[in-house]
């Protein structure tokens, strides 16, 4: 296996232009973020924030200041509503498990959409082993939740509704404010959670305006370090810990806080919201150029998700008919263009994306999909390079007999 990887890496030698578009799975951390983190490994605030000495007090102060800044970006009332976790997956698990178990005597129904990320979908399904029921709301061909069906699904037994603010795969911007109103009108005691990882720092989003009780955000989705995220919990909402251990400043997540990563997450947040309008305008322009260039320049392609302002500013998801997505990612990688195929969370299992199937795509369309996300750091030159590479790569894959698996 190691030898195979070495051969693949050797095949990449000589690449002169690299364009990394796989932000869904991991991100390049900007130098400003790295530089902000470095002093916290060996110069200051390297202590345990619960201990009574200078490095500990520095760590405590740093974490509280970071929580206060992120609370301001989220529109929270208090920094105590921000709970740092090791990432988006952990935050979603904490939200769904931690919020439902205290309410199990009031009801055991959870409502989600058909296109929620795996770390929402699977944890909700897992709770069925503990007597909960899960209702999945269908979406239309662009991925929008049917609000009438959402209203029908919420009843007195519903303890939690979870809907992503922006879909991680196809970029659909859900009407979260209206969805929250629907939920609370049907049952004011039902908790409303959103995975806002693809909304935070990319579209206008505030927890108060959005009518949510809980919200997940992620560091690497805004070009911060991996291994850190946060869960907003509205004051007064009871969430139980899902892990036990030493309790520090974060009462809902035990263990010693990772101060350098929290600093990096905060710096990435500051950069995302600094010149926010210009950043998002730049991403929308590059996204549009990429979508138009591919759909108009490559035959037999299909855009997955909505167009324009209904779509996240960074998201491009396109199906290439008669072209296997995994093979295309390898072909593009050899030219320095790095993307992911199908669902970023299921591709290793070679299963079609549940999101694409839910919006009506056929299996071969789902298997032939490519997910790309642009950032404020990408340039028009980068996109031009990608648009020069993709048509040739697709033509080559389609020309290989037996490569598509399409009958």
Image (cartoon, grey):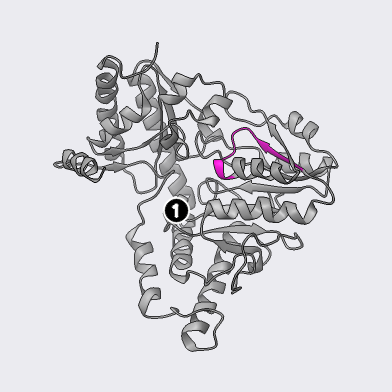
Q: Which residues are magenta?
A: 109-119
Residue matched to label 1: 220
Residue 271: percent from left, percent from top: 44, 58
Identify the residue at image location x=42%, y=45%.
25
Residue 207 in sight from this viewpoint: no
Residue 350: percent from left, percent from top: 43, 31
The N terminus sits in image quarter: top left
Identify the residue at image location x=52%, y=21%.
361
Residue sticking out furthest to the left: 14
Nearest the viewer among 2 and 326 is 2
- Establish if 298 lies above or below 283: above
Q: Secondary structure at mark 1?
A: helix
Query: Looking at the rendering, which quadrant does residue 326 occupy?
Result: top left
Identify the residue at image location x=46%, y=68%.
263
Residue 15 in the magenta stretch? The answer is: no
Q: Alpha-carbon neighbours of circle 1 within 10 Å: few (<14), some, or many (≥20)?
A: many
């Amino acid at each position: 296996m190691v030898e195979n990887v070495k051969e693949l890496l050797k095949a990449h030698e000589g690449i002169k232009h690299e364009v990394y578009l796989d932000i869904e799975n991991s991100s390049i951390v900007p130098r400003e973020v790295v530089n902000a983190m470095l002093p916290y490994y060996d110069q200051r605030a390297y202590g345990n924030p619960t201990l009574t000495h200078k490095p500990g007090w520095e760590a405590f102060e740093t974490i509280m200041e970071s929580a206060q800044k992120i609370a301001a970006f989220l529109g929270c009332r208090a920094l105590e509503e921000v709970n740092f976790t090791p990432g988006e997956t952990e935050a979603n698990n904490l939200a769904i498990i931690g919020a439902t178990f205290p309410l199990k005597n009031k009801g055991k129904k959870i409502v989600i959409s058909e296109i929620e990320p795996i770390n929402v979908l699977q944890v909700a399904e897992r709770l069925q082993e503990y007597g909960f029921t899960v209702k999945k709301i269908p979406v239309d061909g662009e991925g929008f939740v049917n609000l009438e069906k959402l209203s029908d699904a919420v009843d007195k037994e519903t303890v939690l509704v979870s809907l992503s603010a922006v879909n991680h795969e196809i970029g659909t911007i859900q009407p979260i404010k209206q969805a929250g109103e629907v939920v609370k009108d049907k049952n004011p005691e039902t908790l409303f959670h959103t995975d806002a990882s693809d909304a935070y720092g990319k579209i206008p989003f505030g927890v108060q305006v959005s009518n949510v009780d809980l919200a997940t955000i992620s560091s690497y989705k805004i070009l911060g370090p991996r291994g850190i995220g946060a869960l907003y919990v509205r004051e007064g909402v009871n969430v139980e810990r899902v892990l036990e251990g030493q309790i520090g400043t974060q009462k809902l997540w035990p263990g010693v806080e990772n101060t350098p990563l929290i600093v990096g997450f905060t710096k990435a947040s500051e950069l995302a919201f600094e010149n926010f309008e210009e950043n998002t305008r730049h991403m929308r322009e590059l996204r549009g150029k990429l979508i138009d260039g591919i759909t108009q320049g490559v035959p037999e392609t299909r855009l997955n998700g909505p167009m324009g302002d209904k779509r996240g500013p960074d998201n491009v998801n396109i199906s290439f008919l008669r072209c296997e997505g995994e093979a295309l990612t390898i072909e593009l990688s050899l030219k320095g263009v790095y993307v992911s195929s199908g669902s970023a969370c299921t591709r290793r299992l070679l299963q079609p994306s549940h999101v694409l199937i839910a919006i009506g795509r056929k299996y071969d369309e789902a298997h032939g999909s490519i997910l790309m996300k642009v950032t404020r750091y990408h340039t028009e030159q980068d996109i031009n390079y990608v648009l020069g590479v993709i048509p040739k790569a697709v033509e080559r894959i389609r020309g290989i007999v037996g490569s598509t698996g399409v009958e």
